[in-house]
Image: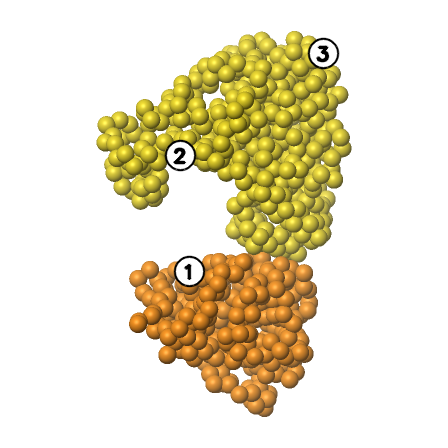
Amino acid sequence: MEILDQTKAPLLEALRSLRASRVVPFDVPGHKQGRGNPELTAFLGRQCMEADVNSQKPLDNLCHPVSVIREAEMLAAQAFGAAHAFFMVGGTTSAVQSMILSVVRRGDEIILPRNVHRSVIGALILCGAVPVYVNPQTDKRLGISLGMSVADVKDAIETHPNAKAVLVNNPTYYGVCSNIREIVRLAHEKGMKVLADEAHGAHFYFGEGLPVSAMAAGADMAAISMHKSGGSLTQSSLMVIGPGVSEGYVRKVINLTQTTSASYLLMVSLDISRKNLATRGREIFAKVQELAQYARDEINDIGDYYAYSRELNNGDTIYDFDPTKLSIHTLDIGLAGVEVYDILRDEYDIQVEFGDVANILAYISVGDRERDIERLVSALAEIRRLYKRSRAGMMAMEYINPEVVVSPQEAFYAETEALPIERSAGHICAESVMCYPPGIPILAPGERITPDIIRYIRYMKEKGGSLTGLEDINIEYIKVLKGGSPCS
Amino acid sequence: MQLTFTEKHTPHVGLCIDVNKHLYTAQSAFQRIDVLESPEFGRILVLDGILMLTEKDEFIYHEMIVHVPMAVHPAARRVLVIGGGDGGAVRELCKYDAVERIDLVEIDAQVVEVCREYLPAVSQSFSDPRVNVRYEDGLKYVRRCSDLYDIIVVDSTDPFGPGEGLFTKEFYGNCFKALKEDGILVNQHENPFYPDDAAAVRRIHKQIVLSFPLSRLYQAHIPTYPSGHWLFGFSSKKYHPVQHLNADRWNALNIKTRYYNTNLHKAAFALPTYVEELIKGVE
């Protein structure tokens, strides 16, 4: 295979020469290089508006790339060690969904951990596949869901030998990795594909001393959020595939739902970010690891907070931990993570990524400066000094094992009725219920509602967690399958 | 040849100073450092294009940031200066025999080196044995101190750039913790005149008020600073800046000053109406 020059950025070069050529635009977008929308141009800048162009001869077309986009995708594929890479402009949600739609059809089974992103449930509703959930074990002290144990995956593969694929979070939002190499081995033995949700793993491909990336582990497909640790614009993403997957078929699936007016701002940001990662990724992520480790040491020095990392590795459900993630357990100062999140935002003007029942996650990237880390650490020290209280009455999240009665698609499109949540036990749910953060499903369409689930929803409502997914904005009624018997 | 240094005080207003000679320029790990020599103001220290001090008028700033708290605190022995890499605040503190130890925490060692070489009249007291200089982030330093200092002087750059962390609630809270039970915090507090700076005055004051039981502003006239009207913050756990001023005790020390005196001390806390109104909403 020819080694491509990663210092090249074909889309950037094409957009530069387009700018220099001063072509008169009688095509969309109608703002015509910003002239038609002066207020927007004043806000975003002329350079940005000039690059917001439509597909045209020298710029290729994302639906059917043959020139500069194709070159940029090939560079990305080589940078990520993949057989092919697809530029995605509908976020990693679209990458995850296209990945799933490419390997399962109606009625097919897919093995996945319960702590999947909501986009996965959406894909199942679209295609009609049936989820086989693996319990991601929970760390009792930290209250976070972990990776899948290899034994559980093996068990699921054995009891569902016809499943088409296994989906793996690499890593989870908190930075926890499963033993993806071994999962790939087990799945491939049975002819199943392995899909990786790498929304939080773009850096695995470039940094040293980081957990293994999906492509390096032999997975078949991965959805990679370039806009998170990769540095590209929000909503730009990549999907990569290994040699065992058909590029043409995947492209066809992507084109079912992806826009025909792909944004060149997003695409050029992917191209430039790929170049940056391929040429400077090693030093960038060494710096990020160093910043995150410094922050962890300082935060653990404050007392009561626990900023965790690889010491958690247990060889299975925490096979590895992403050391660039700054996840901090807050319960020992007597505050829920979401409370610390709010205090940081409201009183210290510090925005962290999320707070859940017991933890906050501060996102560390190449854009961070040492002095900003000092602010975060000092603010946490102050919060402890001013707010520390006993931890009595705090409850950590429990895993609720879902009972999948019908496929998400069947439930989503079934005849339904609305019931008060408190009286819905035993019925089959027709909607999704998520709690943000961290956005892991409490219920997905097709699952039986249990008293434990109702209790958990009530608790999260009381704690002020943001519940989403229900049609009823007040979270009082839930849609269930009509005629469903309340006894199981 | 005409050589002029211009500092824009707002996008539409600037201060121009004729320059004889550009004595020093370098980019440190944190900022660009320049030393200029001018016919009107003598030598000038400039950080990231912003005038920090001139030999001609630095006495006003340094006397006001040090002698006001020192004349109120009855027995200040241990003092922390955060920032202040030029040494001016330390020089004023060294005029007190009762002060036993001065810790100066400056993030940029190169500022201290440059000032020792080019501004000896300002930095002369770095050689005083009571002075201990540490080069680190002030925010990080105070985080580890508790019940240690009688007075903390925050002699920082503006709230944009390397000094940003020294204008935050977490910093003032950490200072509160680092002070003894009757400790005083004094900080440079920007100017109240130009709108962007006035907004900063409000924001800073709001953060301090949340951390200290007593917090007042006082003022001085500094010709080379934006608007020429400069504010300082006086925040304390116990002492009132005017009621607890012991003028006789301070005057008996016979400390030589050119701007500060105990009458001016009291007057400095009397603020213009528009400044009172500016901070009223956040107190």
Q: SS class of the residue under badge 2?
A: helix
Mark in the foreground, 1 or 3: 3
| Residue identified by numbered label 1 | B199
Q: Which chain is orange?
A: B
Q: SS class of the residue under badge 1?
A: helix
The percent position of residue A474, horizontal first and vertical second, equals 51, 31
The percent position of residue B138, horizontal first and vertical second, equals 59, 62
| Residue identified by numbered label 3 | A159
Specify the amino acid type for callout 3.
Thr
The percent position of residue A181, horizontal first and vertical second, equals 68, 24
User: At 63% from the left edge and 46% from the top edge, which residue is drawn?
Assistant: A290
Q: What number of labels is visible?
A: 3
Q: CA distance from mark 2 to mark 1?
A: 41 Å
Q: Residues within 10 Å of mark 2 (few under 14, many from 20)?
A: many
Q: Residue furthest front?
A: A2
Q: Which chain is yellow?
A: A
| Quarter occupied by the C terminus of chain A | top right
**In the drawing, does residue A185 fall left or right of residue B57?**
right
**In the drawing, does residue B31 fall left or right of residue A328?**
left
**Chain letter behind tag 1:** B
The circle on residue A120 is none
Specify the amino acid type for callout 1.
Ala
Q: Which corner quadrant of the image does residue A284 belong to?
A: top right
Q: Residues within 10 Å of mark 3 (few under 14, many from 20)?
A: few
| Residue identified by numbered label 2 | A12
Residue A122 can be seen, yes or no: no
Residue A20 can be seen, yes or no: yes
Q: Residues within 10 Å of mark 1 (few under 14, many from 20)?
A: some
